[in-house]
Image (tube, grey):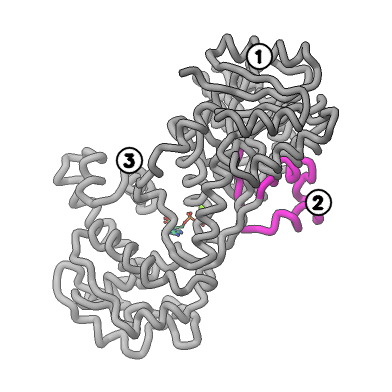
């Protein structure tokens, strides 16, 4: 059976053009001339998606968006047709739950992309959720349940989402979840750390370049936007984009095309934009460091990740899962967390959120005796502040005599200037061992270490082992 669409427009010519185009794409089509008729159609048929004009004889098309979103037809993806250049209405529609918009006069190529997206949204609706462990946002706290619901909802749309949250709270994980549950799941997810690219390389990293377009451009580079084609672009630390790049990016988002440096032609771009920063983006706008027009475009829907201290009931579960992961990647049995350690963790304010919890547990694992992590292994002071590097807790020696292979008693300030240096040396040794055993086959070494290839590459770089 062919997919079925509902087109709502009071101009017969437009209805006919849209219906013909859809039919050519293998989609059957009903057309309604006003809101009342559209609602009647919705009651009697099961549509795969709906496309509505905004100015209708008996009311506003936005009303239909709301009607669908809040009613029994919630599963029907709806897109709107806006007057050319009317971004305000387009954004209003997206906020109300429309999955996308096209502007008049309708560009047929753009319409085709939209229809394909709508149909994919539908396929994914019935697919079981991606159980990929890396992408699971764990937690049963009410605010985490709500977050997961919000994520599931925005995954059914193509609207830009801005993710706010303190550092280490899970912004990237949330972005990956939106991508993985959405219509673009089988296309690339491309994260860009906007704060990490040197200003002079930024344009070519984003938009690509042709070979020979500047000194050092030895070959064509498609750029990050093109490599995300069909998928999702995650602009991480978006507040750090320099102003001139903000202008160029805004243009790319608005026009849905880019021109690589040195290229004679523009390239159409079809990506969903997700962005995040731990900074206050609204404040950056009022301080003049972030353009309000770009802010307005990327912040159509905002999701905020609660800090870990506001979901401390999740700490036992998170700690358990994280510990299992760290221990197995180090080839160790998973130690228990003592009741005391748990309560210390649950009282700690975690300025660095889940990432900090990971770091604390990783450190504790190398300090504890094999079976149990106790409160003092966490190296968290009673007042909730982490200890300074050169100021171990008074009872640190009590657990400094665990046995091989970790040998924490090697940690004396004579050989290692700090605990971090000591831990690095352990990490380095484990990685070198794995590499030697696998004859520098990094994929095999990563497997041996129980970490991803990416993580191994990152660690090699961090430890200066990269050749
Ligand atoms: N709810 C969660 N369940 C499981 N793991 C989580 C959760 N939240 C965060 N993590 C883990 O914590 C670490 C930090 O998460 P992530 O990188 O998504 O945070 P972030 O907000 O992007 O951090 P930053 O501000 O440093 O960029 C990752 O290793 C991630 O897997
Ligand atoms: Mg991040």
Neighbour tally class for label 2: few under 14, some 14-19, many 20 plus, Cα within 10 Å: few
User: SS of the residue at dot 2?
Assistant: loop
Q: Is residue 145 left or right of residue 158?
A: left
Q: Residue at x 81, y 35 (%)?
A: 60
Is residue 128 inside the magenta stretch? no
Relative to 11, 5 lies left or right = left
Helix or strand or loop: what does disc 1 sit on?
helix
Q: Give the side of residue 1 with respect to residue 439, left or right.
A: right
Q: Is residue 252 left or right of residue 218?
A: right
Q: Earlier in the sequence, mark 3 or mark 1?
A: 1
In the depicted structure, whether residue 149 falls above or below residue 407: above
Tag 1 residue: 19
**Residue sitting farthest toward the bottom:** 394
Give how far across and how far down residue 159 sits, in percent. Answer: 64, 39
Q: In the rendered image, which quarter is residue 77 located in?
A: top right
Q: Which residues are magenta?
A: 273-301
């Amino acid at each position: 059976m062919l997919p079925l669409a509902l087109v709502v427009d009071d101009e017969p010519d437009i209805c006919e053009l849209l219906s013909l185009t859809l039919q050519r794409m293998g989609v059957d089509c009903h057309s309604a001339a006003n809101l009342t008729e559209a609602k009647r159609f919705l009651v009697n048929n099961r549509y795969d998606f709906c496309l509505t004009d905004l100015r209708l004889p008996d009311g506003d098309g936005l009303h239909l968006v709301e009607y669908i979103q809040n009613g029994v037809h919630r599963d029907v993806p709806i897109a709107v047709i806006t007057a050319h250049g009317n971004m305000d209405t387009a954004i209003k529609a997206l906020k109300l739950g429309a999955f996308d918009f096209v502007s008049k006069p309708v560009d047929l190529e753009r319409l085709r992309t939209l229809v394909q997206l709508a149909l994919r949204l539908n396929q994914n609706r019935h697919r079981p959720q991606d159980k990929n462990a890396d992408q699971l946002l764990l937690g049963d706290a009410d605010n985490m349940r709500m977050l997961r619901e919000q994520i599931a909802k925005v995954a059914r749309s193509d609207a830009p989402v801005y993710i706010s949250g303190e550092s280490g709270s899970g912004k990237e994980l949330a972005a990956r979840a939106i991508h993985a549950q959405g219509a673009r799941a089988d296309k690339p997810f491309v994260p860009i750390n906007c704060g990490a690219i040197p200003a002079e390389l930024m344009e070519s990293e984003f938009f690509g370049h042709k070979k020979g377009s500047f000194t050092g451009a030895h070959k064509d580079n498609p750029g990050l936007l093109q490599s995300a084609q069909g998928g999702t672009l995650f602009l991480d630390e978006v507040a750090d984009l320099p102003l001139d790049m903000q202008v160029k990016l805004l243009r790319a988002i608005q026009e849905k095309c880019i021109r690589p440096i040195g290229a004679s032609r523009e390239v159409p771009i079809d990506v969903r934009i997700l962005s995040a920063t731990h900074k206050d983006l609204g404040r950056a706008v009022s301080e003049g460091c972030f353009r309000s027009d770009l802010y307005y475009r990327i912040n159509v829907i905002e999701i905020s990740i609660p800090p870990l201290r506001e979901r401390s009931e999740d700490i036992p579960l998170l700690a358990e899962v994280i510990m299992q992961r760290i221990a197995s990647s180090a080839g160790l049995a998973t130690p228990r967390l003592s009741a005391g350690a748990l309560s210390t963790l649950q009282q700690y304010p975690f300025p660095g959120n889940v990432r900090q919890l990971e770091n604390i547990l990783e450190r504790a694992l190398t300090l504890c005796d094999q079976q149990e992590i106790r409160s003092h292994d966490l190296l968290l002071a009673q007042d909730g502040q982490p200890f300074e590097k050169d100021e171990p807790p008074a009872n640190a020696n009590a657990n400094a005599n665990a046995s091989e292979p970790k040998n924490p008693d090697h940690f004396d300030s004579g050989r290692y200037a700090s605990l971090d240096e000591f831990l690095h040396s352990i990490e380095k040794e484990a990685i070198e061992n794995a590499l030697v055993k696998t004859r520098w086959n990094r994929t095999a070494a990563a497997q041996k270490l129980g970490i991803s290839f990416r993580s191994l590459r990152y660690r090699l770089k961090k430890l200066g082992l990269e050749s």
